[in-house]
Image: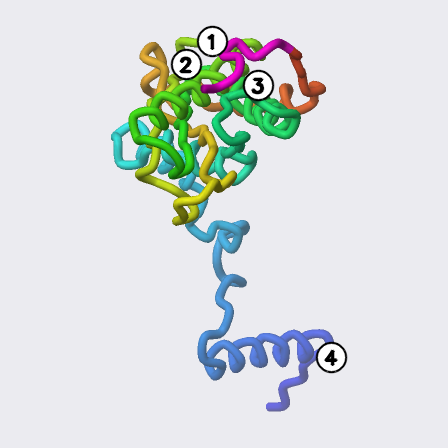
Amino acid sequence: MKITTSPTRLKSLILVAGLAGLTACAPGANLQFYKEAGSVLNRGNFGNSNMNNHLIQTGQLDYAVNLANRFEAEVPSTINFGFNEATLDAEARRVLTQQANWIRQFPEIQFRVYGHTDLVGGDAYNRRLGLRRAQAVVNFFVAQGISRSRLEAVSSLGESQPLVQTQDRERRNRRTVTGVSGFVQSNPAVLNGKYAQIVWREYLTSAEPARVVERADAEGQGG
């Protein structure tokens, strides 16, 4: 008995046989054709945001550390001073304005300002001088509208952490360094369902022009 096949049916059979042969012969063949629609899009990353929040809430990830790294990456953290001075020059005020604009975006975070000196002079005197420099920075931030309760001026590390090892005058050693120190007491867990608010607030703030408040340095001339 002779069996006849229409040209359309013959093409279909050839196509199916070809696909079956490719699937059987090709190692690592893509089998997504046989899976549910959309499964190829899920690479296992959909839960990362929830995982990050979980790690923060359980103490396995320190959000303050992440913010500290971000602060270091996005704004200059250091300013410099003239010899035996604690006054802020124009360049220092420019950098501190950038720092203040960044700090205002995160009212849940506390900041610490460390004062440093070069190696010229006695250690006790340099500690007092470094503290005056840190206090000058804190006063500038307060004048920019940042709450003093979120700021801390730390007694100078003096001669213990110079950037440049020299007994001579060195401007790079005469500096303050601003950094994240932790959370405001009333906001110990900033990601407790509120991180989206912070992101939105930061987005809106980024569109505002930078504020610059000129004022006389409350510390006056350094000793």
Q: Earlier in the sequence, mark 3 or mark 1?
A: 1
* Amino acid type, residue under disc 2 in the picture: Arg
Quadrant in the rendering for residue 117? top left
Residue appearing at x 38%, y 39% in the figure: 119
Q: Earlier in the sequence, mark 4 or mark 2?
A: 4
Q: Are marks 2 and 1 in contact (CB under 8 Å)?
A: yes
Q: Which of the image's four quarters has the C terminus?
A: top left
Image: magenta residue range? 215-223
Q: Are marks 4 and 2 in contact (CB under 8 Å)?
A: no
Near-viewer residue (126 or 32): 126
The circle on residue 201 is 3
> On the image, numbered disc 4 is attached to which residue?
7
Q: Earlier in the sequence, mark 4 or mark 3?
A: 4
Q: Callout 1: few (<14), some (14-19), or many (20+) C-alpha neighbours within 10 Å? A: some
Quadrant in the rendering for residue 19? bottom right
> On the image, numbered disc 1 is attached to which residue?
147
Q: Is residue 205 above or below residue 126?
A: above
